[in-house]
Image (cartoon, helix red, strand yellow):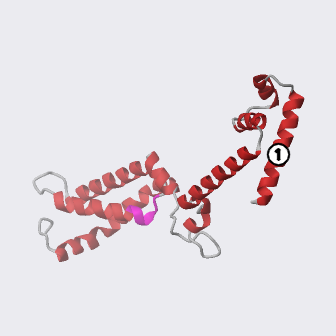
Amino acid sequence: MVSESNEEVRDSLYEKYEPLIKFIVKKYMTSANKYGLDYNDLIQEANVGFTDALNSYDEQKEASLKTFISLCIKRKLINAIRKAQTTKNKMQQASLSLDYDYDKNGLPLIDVIKDETADPLLKFSEQENEKVLLQKIKKELSKNEQKVFSYLLKGLNYKEIALLLDKTEKQIDNTIQRIRNKVRLLIKEE
């Protein structure tokens, strides 16, 4: 009967061995739960093992069909649990779907976490606005203020700028205050 590819025969064999399949699955549930596999996952793997057993059973071997089915199911379950232990699988289990509704307001995750500033056109526009503003600022500044401003943009502090321009810290501080006032006026105009 096993060697026949008749669906009715396979269904009757499944009904006969279904209690064995469920018994074996229950033995592996504790270790499977640790790695995110539930009962239905194991039943599915066990059914694949059962089908593999029916497809590859050889009467000429000395094992009974029941023993062979048990062995194939156990191997399939052990492989599934080993696969669930891998780092890749753990990452997949921990990941969240972007389409699933996690929010109380009925919004999918993609809408909850999306970044409005991620729009490339918006970013380009902001960069262009910054360039235009920097050009206007530089036009309003004296040559000395432009030097100090460029050093400020590079992240230098008062002492470093004073050393580079051979000025006192107080002179640099006064220059920076003038730059700030001019920038405030430009921003207000914008």
Residue 105 within the magenta-colored segment of the rendering: no
Q: How many marks?
A: 1
The residue at 30%/64% (across/down) is 47
Tell me where residue 185 appears, x and y as whole percent.
82, 54
Q: Looking at the picture, does residue 20 appear above or below residue 91? A: below
User: What range is drawn magenta here?
Assistant: 37-42
Q: Quadrant of the N terminus?
A: bottom left
Please state which of residues 182 and 110 is positioned toward the viewer in this rendering. Answer: 182
Tell me where residue 29 appears, x and y as whole percent.
45, 58
**Residue 106's image quarter?**
bottom right
Q: Quadrant of the C terminus?
A: bottom right
The residue at 61%/52% (across/down) is 127
Q: Which residue is mark 1?
A: 180
**Residue 146's image quarter?**
top right
Taking the image as shown, residue 103 lies to the left or right of residue 37, namely: right
Question: At numbered mark 1, what does the secondary structure look like: helix, strand or loop?
Answer: helix
